[in-house]
Image: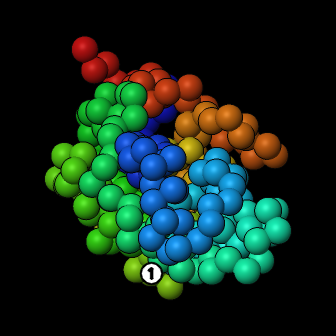
Amino acid sequence: MANFEAVLFDLDGTLCQRTQDTETLYARVFERVGEDPFGAPSDLWTALSGPPDHDDPIGYYGAGFARVAAQHDRSDADTLALARELVAAIDDSAVELLPGASVALDAAAAAGQVGLVTNGPADSQRTKLDALGLGDRFDAVVFAAELPRAKPHALPFERALDDLGVAPDRALYVGNSVEYDVAGSQNTGLAAAWLRNEQGPGSYDPEYTLNSLADLPEVLGVNNE
């Protein structure tokens, strides 16, 4: 059982996931741009580098579309136009909490202060938080896209810890990305609780591995009953 003064969370892929129909969204993007479709949503998600809460969404999705276009011999495609249309079509309010998220947040609040550190821009991430009913659940919120450096750099974690007045070794960070969440938090001196996914931990060694967010109370030694 650990004794932490603060628990910080990632947002996308950790506390919540999108609920839009990706097949319909993908087809609509090509229709609106006037491009013949190529690939599938799964091809785009595989081609993307890093988590979806990115500070340059058009460049992020444009690079993904470019990789998929190359795989389908479609170098003529306007991948930036596709990216702009995709970003415009994404509904940031179409999100839902992942299983165990409410339990994890309650346990974190019972253990100490609660923070959020996300790479996403403030406008889209606030929309998600409001839609999820989490607008007032955090003692500190850091939108790393508004900072000079984003996760896995230490700056977003340090900003949250400064706002909370907590030392790094007294805080736990919960996230689903080993490259961004585990590496970034450990490099800053926080313990990492990795939410297991199909990619596996690779060469990373988080202090805690969660099969579900519902496992967090046990890590914190909190009884939510």
Residue name at image x 58 percent, y 80 percent: 80
Q: Which amino acid is tagged 1?
A: Leu
Mark count: 1
In this rendered view, identify the residue nearer to me: 195 or 172.
195
Q: Position of residue 126 (x, y in %)?
A: 26, 63
Q: Tell me what residue is drawn at x 69 percent, y 55 percent.
A: 39
The x, y position of residue 53, in whole percent, is 48, 63
Q: Is residue 138 above or below residue 161?
A: above
**In front of the other: 61 or 221:** 61
Is residue 121 visible in this depiction of the protein?
yes
Q: Position of residue 102 (x, y in %)?
A: 29, 33
In the displayed orientation, state which residue is furthest to the bottom: 148
Q: Position of residue 166 (x, y in %)?
A: 38, 58
Residue 212 vertical placement versus 76 (above, below): above
Label 1 SS: loop
Residue at image mark 1: 147
The image quarter in which residue 221 lies? top left
Residue drawn at 39 percent across, 47 percent down:
20
Q: Is residue 97 left or right of residue 23?
A: left
Image-based side of 11 in relation to 149, left or right: left
The residue that appears at 34% across and 38% down in the rendered structure is 97
Q: Determine the image quadrant of residue 206.
A: top right
